[in-house]
Image (spheres, coloured by chain):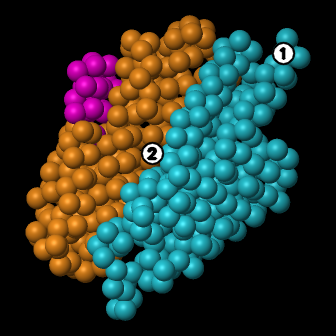
Chain colours: A orange, B cyan
Amino acid sequence: MRDIFEAELAQLGDDLITISTMVHSAIRDAGTALLTADVERAQRVIAADADIDELARQADERSVLLLAQQAPVATDLRVVVSALRMSATLERMGDLAQHIAQVARRSYPALAIPEGITPVFTALQDASVRLAERVTTLLETRDLTAANQIEQDDDMIDDLHHDTFAALLNPRWSGTAQETIDITLVGRYYERFGDHGVSIARRVIYLVTGDDART
Amino acid sequence: MRDIFEAELAQLGDDLITISTMVHSAIRDAGTALLTADVERAQRVIAADADIDELARQADERSVLLLAQQAPVATDLRVVVSALRMSATLERMGDLAQHIAQVARRSYPALAIPEGITPVFTALQDASVRLAERVTTLLETRDLTAANQIEQDDDMIDDLHHDTFAALLNPRWSGTAQETIDITLVGRYYERFGDHGVSIARRVIYLVTGDDART
């Protein structure tokens, strides 16, 4: 019974790592599509989101089956409940990558982000890809160094998100309303993406240390 | 044992209804604060969000305790897992109401939403308050009429959200960048609020009918 439980639990962990890897690809490609007006790439990210959703659904089914058949307690229960939370969070991160790709697709053949503000979005993109990579590392290794780095990546994302508003509110800003809308929305998507990364980091910290620093 | 379980499950249901009632107040007051530049009201919504977060945390603790002590299966397990999901969703709806109140506070003493576009936001607000009220009704009664009405409210919110972009992209739009940002963000907050309402509606439909129409 215990062996089956351990195997199922390991599989659940692997499911989350797989989803996290897909989220990492999604944000990487969504940002590239956004910054280079690559509509085929945007289209691939949009189409691939259904796979992330389906895997998250399967992970949830596995979690509920584990609860029903094994009735875990204590740490094991905490791991399964956390998996339920984290699959939902990863699924949402995939949605946000998809939203960024949708902005790229809608703007095509133009760039959604005008050139003057590209450096801020390149930095947002880099920090978000790094954060996504570290989420995978954290799920694989449970090494809390990665959790701390995720918090730092998110701080940087928040600062950069603030910079997008500063650019829009600068008297020299002369973009169109559509550009202002897209910058506002895409900035928000990145900001939420970072928040979700932190949510996963804190759940893993809680699992490893028992220290509840939930937001 | 069964009696204790039933009592705990009933309490969990009551917790969700309490949180939902608080979310209803939060969105009602946030929208009023936004549309009337009522900074004291905005401040109250912002402060009250911590109470929603705390109640959601308590509901989660109750859910995990129920899983640990009662090891529910079948329908009972589904109810507890759904409660875990729904508390997270309600907590997020509270956050969105808080975000709307924060925009009202930041703009004070000015109105964040310029007068020309007020009718769209009044309609968004009305639909969102109605949806929030129906979420509470649905949690109280499990009457699926309310679930269908929530889907309709959300369709209306989506249409109105689209109208906010149409207004901003109209050549006659002459608002400031700050107004464009606020309209974009607040529109997005309402749109997400509606989506979360639908997520709860679908979970209740699933609990009542076993029909999985998750988004």
User: What residue appears at the point 35 percent right and 34 percent down from the top-left corner?
Assistant: A198
**Furthest-right residue in this view:** B3
Is the C terminus of chain A in the top left, top right, bottom left or bottom right quadrant? top left
- Camera-nearest residue between A43 and B178: B178
Q: Residue at x 39, y 32 (%)?
A: A200
Q: Can the viewer see residue B96 in this picture? A: no
Q: Is residue B98 above or below residue B114?
A: above
Choose between B60 and B113: the one closer to the eye: B113
The disc at residue A91 is 2
User: Based on the displayed image, in which of its 4 quarters is residue A145 positioned?
Assistant: top left
Residue ID for mark 1: B4
In terms of image quadrants, where is residue B76? top right
Q: Chain of mark 1?
A: B
Q: Nearer the viewer, mark 1 or mark 2?
A: 1
Examine the structure image and report whether residue A148 is included in the region drawn in magenta. Answer: yes
Q: Residue furthest top?
A: A2
Q: Is residue B164 in view?
A: yes
Quadrant occupied by the N terminus of chain A: top right
Q: Main secondary structure of the magenta part?
A: helix
Question: Helix, strand or loop at disc 1?
Answer: helix
Left or right relative to A30: residue B55: right
Percent coordinates x, y for residue A112 in the rendering = 24, 72
B181 inside magenta stretch: no
Task: Specify the subunit that label 2 lies on.
Answer: A
- Magenta range is A132-152
10 Å crowding of disc 1: few (<14), some (14-19), many (20+): few
How many numbered circles does the render carry?
A: 2
